[in-house]
Structure formats: structure tokens, C-alpha cells
Amino acid sequence: MARLAQTEGLTDIQREILSTVRDFVDKEILPVATELEHRDEYPSRIVEGLKELGVFGLMIPEEYGGLGESLLTYALTVEEIARGWMSVSGIINTHFIVAYMLKQHGTQEQKDYFLPKMAAGEIRGAFSMSEPALGSDVSAISSKGVRDGDAYVLTGQKMWLTNGGSSTLVAVLCRTDEGHPEGTPPHKSMTTFLVEKEAGFGEVRPGLTIPGKIEKMGYKGVDTTELIMDGLRVPADRVLGGETGRGFYHMMDGVEVGRVNVAARGCGVAQRAFELGVSYAQQRHTFGKPIAQHQAIQFKLAEMATKVEAAHAMMVNAARKKDSGQRNDLEAGMAKYLASEYCKEVVEDAFRIHGGYGFSKEYEIERLYREAPMLLIGEGTAEIQKMIIGRRLLEEYRIQG
């Protein structure tokens, strides 16, 4: 077991889960990840393997067929998977945000119907807040849900859905003005709809189109899509929690889990970059000795390892805070911000250690170099995290009188 990024105080069950996942990553993901990524191929066999391991039910309560594990266990699992291939952790993350939102906020009927199928991986989740024109400004959402008898009619265009094609359940945030007087703040007139659909592309149910995969610089394999709603009818019993106007709170609660996940991904990718850098530095010779014996390279390795360790510690702290039932938006924002920035820096240092070979598609570091930037913008940009952190600090340290 590596010295870095160890977590104290884990139970025997947690250690067993993480050991099993690490073995799976080493045997089933790392040997094929770069080849699949270069082909932009969906990792079907890997996903089936994760289903068999029970990973899709990791945080879903045992009463619904899941393992009932904590956010910490989930985050450490994501860290291991991202060490193998970050795209696979994205497939799981969106699924879990939807499962978490259902567990925390769903009606009993919604939980009974969706969670057992989600735990088994039969229903796969995606969630959708962003739109083409709004970026991180969630309050500017223009997609609408209008009541029509015993259903709502949804219209609008969504953007950046991870799992948009492969998912069969999408939690979609729309504006619903029903029952809200004029002048109601935007965040109090939003509703989360649970939209069931067929997997695939094109018109996946009447009024709902998934146009196709968005071509990306990195984060390949996983499908990232748009979602177009044009007169999409959703039954009223598929409003998350059965009450309109609560969607913003549902999504923000889910995103806190998502930010811990992105921090965990950053930790996993940084760990892999360090492993590649420290290994290559001992094999490559210049001026008659391995480059690891040059002080300049040792300084790089020292900085990289310190960043790996610091990011891991902050991620674990944010997960444990959420597990304890406390508000963790400050810790999740800090962990996501630090882990994504440090990941980018550790990957770049590993890339530099590889020299010219880092630029070659033959070497794994090339893939990591293209994947790391996604973490700087996913689940809210670094600038959004700093804004959240700053506001929370001012709440905590407000001067009296």
C-alpha cells in the first residue's frame, strides 16, 4: 500500500470495500483506460463490473437494496476509481447525486420505486441544472414547467449532462411559477422533476431529445450531452418531494455531495500523476544517473506529494462533516477548489518530469493532462467556489456591533 493519502479511523468493512475497488482498478481499468479514452469509447465492461461489485448502490440504504455506506466511503471509492480513469468516476457521480437527492428529499413512493432499481444499476441517473446561456448562474434558468391537469409540461434546453445518453432517469431543474406571487426570488420558484427516459440518442421519449455526444478535449468515454424539452409531459407525482418551489434547495444539497466527489476525483488523478512521475524519474537517466537523483526533480516530487496529501486530507474532512449531519458547503467548496487546483499542478509537474514523452499519446500522463482541466470547472468553477467560501467565512466571522 502506498504511503500517501491514507485515511485513519476506517472500519474493517470500509477497508475491505476500498481494497476490492483498488484491485478492480488495477486489473480492469488501468490496463484499458488510455486505449478506450483515445477511442472515446463508453466503458461498458467496466460499468458492468462495477454493478457486480455493488458500487451503484454504495450510498443507497440497505432497505432499498444498497450497501448503506457513508459519503466518506463513497468519496474514497471515487478517489480509487479516478486514479484509474476519471471518466468512470463521472458515470457514478451523477447517478449518486440523483440517488442522494431521492433518499433525502423524495416522497416515499419515489424512494420505493427508484432506489432499489438504482442500487442494482438497472436505472442509471443523471442530473441537469445548467443551460447554454447561464454557466454557473443557476438563478437565470429559463426552462419552464407549466401545470396542465395531472401533469407538467416542460420546455427548454439544458447543457452539460454527464450520462445524458446512457442514463434512464434525469433530475431536471426548471422554473415553475405556479403558486408563487410576482416578485418571488428566482431560487424559490424552481422545481426538480424526475424524468424517466430510454437510454440512447435522438427522441428518447415524446417531447424529449438528446441530440448526441458533445466532443470534448478530455473526459472522454463518458457521454456529455444537451437535453431539449419541447412539450415534455411529466406526471405531477414525479415532482421531487411532491412539492414545487423546492428544486434549488434539492440541487444545492446534491451539489455539495458532488463537490466532495469532484475533490475526490482530483485526489485520485493527482495520485496517479504522482505515481507516474515518481516511477518515470527512477527509470530515466541523464548526465549518468536517474533523474530522480537530481535535486530539481526531488523538489518537484516533494511538492507533488505534499499537494496530494493536503488535498486528500481536505476531501476526507468535507466528507466526514457531511456524514455527521452538519452543513459542509464551506468545507466542500474548499476541498473542491484546492483538490482541483493541486491536481492540475501535480499533473503538470508529472508531465514535465516525462519531458518530450509526456507529449506522446503512448504515455498515460498525456491523458491525465487533458482530463485535469475539467475539474477546474465541473460542479462550479474555481471562482464560484471562492465566492461561496468567502461568503461563508463572512457569515462565520461577522464582527458584532
Image: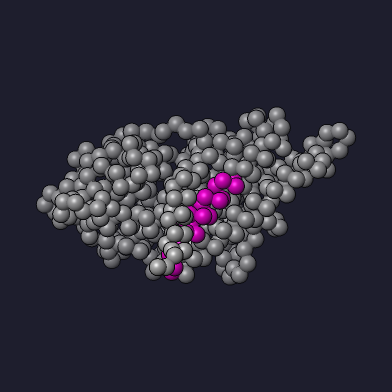
Query: Horizontal placement of 114 versus 50: left or right?
Result: left
Q: Residue furthest front?
A: 401
Question: x and y percent of residue 8 in the render?
Answer: 63, 67
Q: Residue at horizontal 15%, vertical 54%?
A: 181
Q: Residue furthest left?
A: 149
In the image, taking residue 398 as reference, residue 366 lies left or right, namely: right
Residue at image point 64% right, 52% down: 308
Left or right relative to 99: residue 271? right
Residue 162 in magenta stretch: no
Q: Which residues are magenta?
A: 325-343
- Image coordinates for residue 2, horizontal then vertical, percent: 70, 56
Q: Which quadrant of the view contains residue 112?
A: bottom left
User: Does residue 122 show up?
Assistant: no
In this view, which residue lies farthest toward the right? 288
Asked whether 391 or 311 is in front, the reply is: 391
Q: Position of residue 236 (x, y in %)?
A: 19, 55
Looking at this view, is 307 or 351 the one in front? 307
Question: Which quadrant would the N terminus be assigned to in this image?
Answer: bottom right
| Residue 16 in sight | yes
In the picture, which quadrant includes the C terminus? bottom left
The answer to whether 301 is drawn above or below residue 59 in the figure is above
Q: Nearer the viewer, residue 341 or 257?
A: 341
Instruction: Look at the magenta stretch and give its main secondary structure.
Output: helix
| Residue under the image location 73 percent in, 46 percent down | 301
Taking the magenta stretch, the answer to whether it contains residue 332 is yes
Total residue callouts: 0
Query: Residue 78: horizontal and vertical position, in percent?
Result: 53, 53
Residue lying at 22% horizontally and 60% vertically, measured from the top left: 243
Q: Residue 203 lies in what quarter of the image?
A: top left
